[in-house]
Amino acid sequence: MVRKIRTLKFVLILIFILISSGRIFGQFLIFNGKVYKAANGYLSEEQLRSMGFNVLKNSKVYLVFNRKLIIGSNGDFLVDFEQYVPNSYQILNGTLYVRDSFIATFLNLKRSENTYYDKPIAITYVTMQQNELVIQTDIEVDREFINVSLSGGKLKIQIMPATFQAAAVPDKVGVITNNDVVQLTSENEYEDYQLTVEGKRFIILLVPKEQRLEYVRKVERFMGHYYTVSYLIADPKLVDFVPLLPSGGIGKTATLANILKANGLLHGINANYFDPNTGLPIDIIIANGRVLSHRYGLRPVFVETWDDKVFIRKAYFDVTVRLGSVLLLVKGVNTPSFSELNLYTEEYSLTIPRDSTREYIVVRNGKIDSFGYVKNVPDGRNSYVVMVSRDLFNRFLKALKPGDNFSLEVYTDEGYRIKNAIGAGPLIIQDGKIIEDSREEKLRYGGGIPTSRTTRTIIAIKNGKVHLITIEGGIGMNFDDVAKFLIDKGYQSAMMLDGGGSTAMVYQGRYVTSQSPRNIPVALGLR
């Protein structure tokens, strides 16, 4: 018996030595429902404390965990006065760093490739909607835990270490589990995918093997002149038309190619008009249901709904906020201009305007957090700053207090739910005809926008598909030229986007328009 105990101790010490020599290595550690990422094979003392270790440093290092004592000296550890483990830690700039492999062995963790873990990740449900596969887990995850591949159009997903605990799986999705490895496969064929990780979710956007997108470039003769016309034609049942911002947010500008690249997309055009002095977009922007800019009134818009319908027409959008039990109309979103009630989102990169006649309400995680001026919106997708006139505040919001609920709603004139929208104009074609009030419509736009002959960017709809169009060369086109050009081609609806020097189209990550790219604040990307 004594010999067996000695042999066991020797084996344990040998394992410790192999681990501490770097021959066994892990980059991640999952413990008590949290993920810890090792830096060059070491965990910091802050991470150790988060795991439940007590840490004391003086002439020696002391770690205490569940009444077990680890004593460190000169980089070596003695575990419970029995096991000597060399080269197990280091101290840099006064901070203790311990080898992740030592901690993994001490805690008796399992190992799966580059991850040590006490319990595997639990996959709690899997959903598939509109070619978006969502895999929900029980802990916050990292991209390193999932491997996605396409072979012959077949999707294969491997998650490890993991167990499958979902009650059901989507149609045509198969599940295989083995030794803390979960493998998902799909019967459908896909040509591409995009993986993102958000908190406890893996989200995979899938591109079906269908003609979701077509690019055409032509030299066309129109009214005695030759124009270079580029078309991006997309099926709204397969493609989303997403307004995109530069990486710096609202108030920043970048070239179309850089905006697309920053958002992980390959195809798109320039979108809204903007103020060249501030870089702020003009008119409405709604991206994935999130209101980023708003202009009150009846304006031409392109809209994509959550059920994949698209239209171009003049429409009213009312943006409202509910503060506690009070519902109020928003007059401006992410703008330096003052109104009765302005709303600012985290995408607003400029300083929120300060005014002594305004009250400021800070929202965090959907709750009223505090009152008083702040320069910027707190981090978080459900955080806002509401700037309201003092008169409105005193009449309706005096009873508002921290902890009260906050919500935002967009009301439309026909009750549709907006997924994506951009506003620009003029509106050109409605129901297959040039709009009846075209003369009045042209007068609504200054700066020669409708009347000058210049390069044009257009969004139009024909036969249920969305056509993004750029027109270059010739003598340029004005409103009347564009209207005739599009009517002759059978478009049912169309409106202008920002044109002239802003006109740009990118396909497969490269410009297909000829003029030098200009910095713009908003792009319309195809996803």
Image: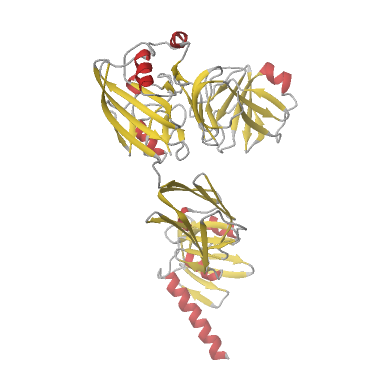
Residue 493 coordinates in the image, percent (x, y): 45, 23
Q: Dividing the picture into quarters, in which one does residue 117 lie?
A: bottom right
- 150 or 182, which is in the foreground? 150
How many numbered circles does the render carry? 0
- Look at the image and tell me whether residue 34 can be seen: yes
Residue drawn 73% across the image and 18% down it: 395
Residue 295 coordinates in the image, percent (x, y): 53, 20
Residue 222 coordinates in the image, percent (x, y): 28, 18
The answer to whether 408 is drawn above or below residue 485 in the figure is below
Query: What's the image's color scheme?
Result: secondary structure
Q: Quadrant of the N terminus?
A: bottom right
- 191 or 202, which is in the foreground? 191
Residue 305 placement, left or right of 468: right
Residue 283 coordinates in the image, percent (x, y): 49, 21
Q: Dividing the picture into quarters, in which one does residue 502 lie?
A: top left
Residue 369 placement, left or right of 195: right
- 31 or 501, which is in the foreground? 501
- Look at the image and tell me whether residue 57 can be seen: no
Residue drawn 45% across the image and 65% down it: 113
Residue drawn 46% across the image and 78% down it: 14
Q: Quadrant of the C terminus?
A: top left
Residue drawn 40% across the image and 70% down it: 23
- 112 or 482, which is in the foreground? 482
